[in-house]
Image: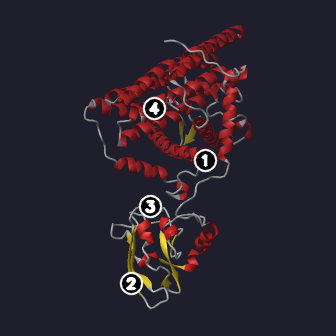
Amino acid sequence: MEILISLIKIIVVLLVLLTCVAYLVLVERRVSAFIQNRIGPNRVGYKGLLQPVADVLKLFIKEDIVPKLANKPLHRLAPIISIVVALSTIAVVPFGNTINLFGYEIKLQIASVNIGILYVLALTGLGVYGLAIAGWASNNKYSLLGGLRSSAQVISYELSMGVSIIGVILVAGTLELDKIVEYQYGWKWLILLQPIGFITFFVSVFAETNRLPFDLPEAEPELVGGYHTEYTGLKFGLFFLAEYANMITASAIVVTLYLGGWQFPYLQSFGLSEFWTSLIQVGTFATKVAAVLLFMIIIRWTLPRFRYDQLMDLGWKFMLPLSIANVIVTAFIIYLFE
Amino acid sequence: MTQTKITRTNDLTFWQKLYIPEIIKGMKITIKQMFLPKFTRQYPEERWNPPASFRGRPVLVEENGKERCVACGLCSRVCPALAIEVQASETELSKERYPVRFEINMLRCIFCGLCEEACPEEAIVMSKEYELIFNNQEEAIFGKDKLLISKENLKERLEYLRQYR
């Protein structure tokens, strides 16, 4: 029975995630259009709601071109690594408390791993292999530059990301993501306790997901398409999917670690039944994730791309010292008060 | 590598160097833009009505069911793209000459408007039509059947020509 419940959870979460990815692309296109005083895609379906379907269909029927001198096994492997990593990170994210369905107490999290955060860090670290291998296997100078840039970027930002997470672990006293959310009961959100850590973590998230101020691996004006220059059809689609799935997972992690996860302040005082409480908590989580995603999209059209050396400067000279200082101060305060 | 010292007219203040207040300022502008009116014209539904000075496809002016053209051939001579072909013949009307065949190859036409300027009779003018569709090269040669447009429909352009030419 346990296995069956897990399987159902996996399928439901994956389906929801993939639908969200498809619609995130549409939302991004519409919001970008609005920011640029345009209307955006509004032809397919009611107000353009079927645009993702059309997009995916188009990618399906495109010809799959592999460059003659590409390293074919690696060229095929790269998008698979990207998508597997992007989709498996969501496994440890708690998107709600327990819910009572048909007499079963179901925990709204696929896997409650006791080293949750480490799992997330390990997988996001793996994700860069997809991009680096794609850049190498394409046998194209632009792709190679994109892949190199993404690996350099991840090395410089993974560090400050990990260090800023240490602050969270120190305060919450656990590595499990669901325990961290439980710690943030009421208004004890970690963004209020760890503002500096939140900023460094959030900036690193932008770098991790290759979002605009740090989207050097695919900088269109300089590198054509970056690591996915030589990818067409569904392989390109997989990279695209992985990128947006990464965005959703990353914002889910941000919400879990700093914005209180599924916690809805004062929800218990409303006196709702347990079932409705759980549903509202899931809704709260979804709303918070959507807000973070919208923020990421708006940031994309606000900030220009960083130059490569500026990126390195920011990562090594500013973010890393700041996050280390944050950890030291946090540790000191905890030592003093306990 | 030699480092060049960058000089600014005024250095950044402490708050500007913090970067985050500046990002928030920038985001305010971005969010404000989202609610401004849109510039998009939803083309097949909303069409553009060009001003009288617009040079669309050249047409022949039709007056009292007949073309004004006297088949002098000036438009054909002046056409830089050699798009116009006129074949003249005699008629009982007071103008004495008329075009038996008047063809404009729309694949060659460059919409320069020289034919209109050269015409002594105000018989060929540029219309407002900008949607030109044809499926093959033969269709692109517009004969008199497609070129003749009655005077009333070209009023705006004719008035414009009288005022500004």
Q: Residue at 40% across / 62% down in the picture?
A: B81
Please tell me which of labels 4 and 1 falls first in the chain.
1
For this orientation, the residue located farthest to the left is A68
- Determine which quarter of the picture holds residue B4: top right
Disc 2 sits on a residue from what chain? B
Q: How many marks?
A: 4
What amino acid is at disc 2?
Ser
Q: Are marks 4 and 1 in contact (CB under 8 Å)?
A: no
Coordinates of residue A29 in the picture (x, y in percent) = 53, 45
Q: Residues within 10 Å of mark 3 (few under 14, many from 20)?
A: some
Q: Which residue is mark 1?
A: A34
Disc 4 sits on a residue from what chain? A
The C terminus of chain A appears in which quarter of the rendering? top right
Q: Are marks 2 and 1 in contact (CB under 8 Å)?
A: no
Q: Which residue is mark 3?
A: B110
Nearest the camera: A74 or B131? B131
**Is A25 drawn above or below residue A334 in the view shown?**
below
What amino acid is at disc 4?
Glu
Please tell me which of labels 2 and 3 falls first in the chain.
2
User: Do dots 4 and 3 share one subunit?
Assistant: no
- Determine which quarter of the picture holds residue A177: top right
Res. B89 mark? 2
Q: CA distance from mark 2 to mark 3?
A: 27 Å
Q: Residues within 10 Å of mark 4 (few under 14, many from 20)?
A: few
Q: Which residue is mark 4?
A: A222
What amino acid is at disc 3?
Ile
Nearest the camera: A300 or A82? A300
